[in-house]
Amino acid sequence: MLKSIFSGLFFGLFALAVSAQPGSNQYTKASDSDPEARAVLEKVKAKYEAYQSVEATFNLTIEFPGADEKEEQTGKMIQQGKQYRLELPSQHLICDGKSIWLYLKENKEVQINNFEEDEESGFLSPMDMLRIYEREDYVYVLSNEYTEAGKIVQDIEFKPLDADSEYSKLRLSVDKASSQIKRIKAFAKDGSRYTLTLSTFKTNLSYPAGTFSWTKTQCPDCYVEDLRID
């Protein structure tokens, strides 16, 4: 369950694939990645890592094949160092740097796991996603540069080297001048489309310790499953 949240939202940043394009079949290993795209990503990572804290609100639009209406969700993400808090209408994901709480509001259930700085575990913090391009599992290219609302936007497309990926395309849009992420659009192989657009962005704010932890007092009636290993 923990991993599925990030798969649908933030893990999609770098875990999905690019669409086929002229000459795209030449990208078969990580070293084939576009140097221009890497330069853009380095700027984005450096900017985000310089912040003491990051708070962002976002809108997630989900389109399913054959469905007439889109599903819309709004959310909020806060990160301060290794601590973070991700809020969606039906669930919260909270980490204090040692433990991770998944709070399912409607079910009144909480699952607790150990936090591990391990890319293979799936328990990556939102800002850790910005380092995934440094791994050898993905290839990426700067696919487009255009003007949107008076600002220059750069699109970077990612392709996983794992042919069994459930996604077929990812497009990361970055404001060229500010090196800030504008949106992420992911294309699943089943025809579903996921678009995450950042609405507001604040930096270097201070938060009380309770922001990044969960206690039983927040939901006395909740069923708690503690899966942490001492």
Image (cartoon, grey):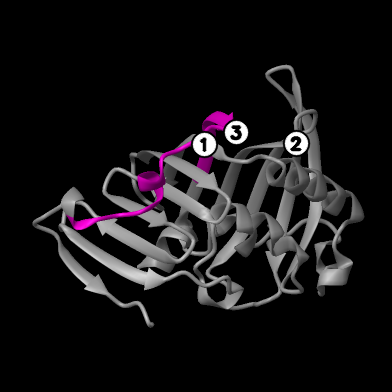
Measuring from the top left, give residue 55's x and y in whole percent. 52, 36
Q: Residue drawn at (52%, 72%), measured in percent from left and top?
A: 116
For label 3, the SS is loop
Q: Residues within 10 Å of mark 2 (few under 14, many from 20)?
A: many
230 or 17, which is in the foreground? 230
Q: Residue drawn at (40%, 50%), measured in percent from left and top?
A: 212
For label 1, the SS is strand
109 or 226, which is in the foreground? 226
230 displayed left or right of 193: left
Q: Is residue 226 visible?
A: yes
111 displayed left or right of 203: left
Q: What is the three-letter code of the residue carrying label 2?
A: Ser
Check the image and report above or below for 32 versus 200.
below
Q: Quadrant of the N terminus?
A: bottom left
Q: Residues within 10 Å of mark 1 (few under 14, many from 20)?
A: some
For label 2, the SS is loop
Q: Are marks 1 and 3 in contact (CB under 8 Å)?
A: no
Check the image and report above or below for 169 versus 226.
above
**Residue 207 belongs to magenta span:** yes
**Residue 199 belongs to magenta span:** yes
| Residue 55, disc | 1
Q: Residue drawn at (57%, 39%), measured in percent from left and top?
A: 54
Q: If you read the primary sequence from the N terminus, does the residue marked by circle 1 or circle 3 appear first?
A: 1
Q: If you read the primary sequence from the N terminus, does the residue marked by circle 2 or circle 1 appear first?
A: 1
168 or 10, which is in the foreground? 10
Q: Are marks 3 and 2 in contact (CB under 8 Å)?
A: no
Q: Which region is colored magenta?
A: 195-216
Q: Is residue 63 visible?
A: no
Q: What is the three-letter code of the residue carrying label 1?
A: Glu
Q: Residue drawn at (19%, 67%), measured in percent from left and top?
A: 224
Q: Which residue is mark 2?
A: 179
Q: Which residue is mark 3?
A: 204
